[in-house]
Image (spheres, grey):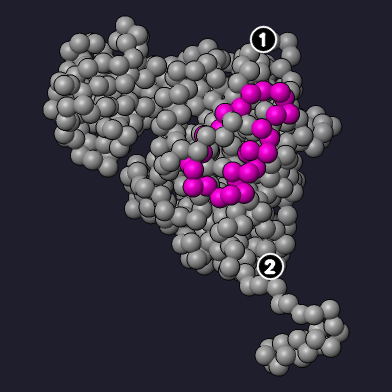
Amino acid sequence: MSKKVRIPTPLRKLTNNEELVEVNSATIGAAIDELQARFPGIAERLVDEKGEVRRFVNVYVNEEDIRFLQNRETVLKDGDEISIIPAIAGG
Amino acid sequence: MSEKNGFMKALKCRECGREYPLEATHVCEFDFGPLEVAYDYDRIKKTLTHEVIASRPKSMWRYRELLPIAGEPTIGKQVGFTPLVKADRLAKKLGIRELWIKNDAVNYPTLSFKDRVVSVALSRAKELGFTTVACASTGNLANSVAANAASAGLKAYVFIPSDLEQGKILNSLIYGANVIGIKGHYDEVNRLCAEIAGKFGWAFVNVNMRPYYAEGSKSMAYEIAEQLGWKLPDHTVVPMASGSLLTKIHKGYQELTKLGLVAQHDTHIHGAQATGCSPISVAQKAGLDFFKPVKPDTIAKSLAIGTPADGFYALKVMRETNAAADDVSDDEIRDAIKLLAETEGIFAETAGGVTVGVAKKLIASGKIPKDSSAVICVTGNGLKTLDAVNGYCGKPREIKPSLREFEALLAHEEKVNA
């Protein structure tokens, strides 16, 4: 089994409107590279020049923010679900 | 309005400046930066004068050129223009020369500053043709969306953490809104709503309508300035959840200055958080320009956002206005709620306790100098968070309907207090 990535609306133009994409990488960082190989241009939307996840991008593994895990080094297991979500305002 | 988009020009990314059409969209496709409304200030300057404003009804819409709708407001026309209370008794307690309370605890119709943002978001949603509105909320926003949607005949879905105060839950249900309690904290509600918003064609006030919604907060700044006689205070203390209100009060002051409606003034905008959820104040005190997300644990549930979307910009505003941030514990929050109630007769919700408590700290430490003027923003009503103070403000003393018993009670108290 592989891992699933939920693609947010603003990025679906790059994934041919695919909402759910499967990846096989072992970490978040590798998964971003894998997405980039398949959908050129997607990595620069997610990470800055230094390779850090952009300020307004939140990445979750099974509903946990990767900043509470190991950021880019967060390890992925088969069946994990990854969500990429823009930061949103208060309430 | 002569032009199709009123005084708005475009949506613009705050990070890279790319422009987008004035639709229901909130994120730059390129870098995920938040989109913000850009205005035609040259045209606004020709229209909006002190006299024009003074001639209009006393609501937030007297500054409508600076609010992001194309035509006239259709929802929440009576919102805003809440009292700015000269708080002399509290000033004396805190040891400051001039103190004001901007009292949005009595905002119309749902007793919090959220009526401002919702009035804008729903008026704009109607312009864009939506019939269902929604929000992710810590309570006050849900109340306001539910009430204002009901008044306009719009269908409403409000998403809240399921452990909210009873008062805040009932205050959404009563209007017939669809209230969905999520088993998780606000940041989880937020994440789910971002996913729902991408799937359903609804106007999510703080997701796809966010650029319009957030601008409503500026009206608090305009009112403060007008009510002070068209001048800016030396200091403003603002509660921070996502950090949006603080950045919009700053923007409001800047716009008034740019339009020549107030004189240029060195004004400082301070941020207040609860210690149990203080990612922004912790970063500010450490001199950082970024924050670390936290898992909230505080009685100030309306401020319990561990991943504040505007935290980065709030830190920037505090740096640029040479201001401070601080945070207060649950006990300090309750004490501050009582202090405000006992000195000024204003019953604020927990967020108001946070703001008053932090103002007290900033004055005591000299970060707000004693010989200056300050405004404290109270954003919600204590009647909605009764759970937080229940058991902390004593109990009524019960007696029989007998004059003798009452006299005995008074005599006893005089002895105790002597």
Report the span colored magenta.
Answer: B150-176
Q: What number is the disc on residue B87? A: none
Residue B175 is covered by the magenta coloring: yes
In percent of width and height, residue B239 lies at 53, 49
Compared with residue B72, is residue B266 higher up or lower down, i.e. above or below? below
Please say if B145 is above or below B316.
above
Q: Residue furthest front?
A: B400
| Image mark 1: chain | B
- Give the quadrant of residue B111: top right
Residue sitting nearer the eye, B179 or B332: B179
Residue B105, horizontal then vertical, whole percent? 68, 49
Q: Residue at x 55, y 15 (%)?
A: B23
Identify the amino acid type marked 1: Lys
Q: Amino acid at mark 2?
A: Glu
Q: Which residue is mark 1?
A: B4
Counting residues from the start of the chain, the first of labels 1 and 2 encountered is 1
Q: Nearer the viewer, residue B392 or A33?
A: B392
Say what secondary structure mark 1 lies in: loop
The subunit carrying tag 2 is B
Measured Cα–Cα span from mark 1 to mark 2: 50 Å
Residue at horizontal 51%, vertical 53%?
B300
Q: Is residue B385 visible?
A: yes
Q: Which residue is mark 2?
A: B342
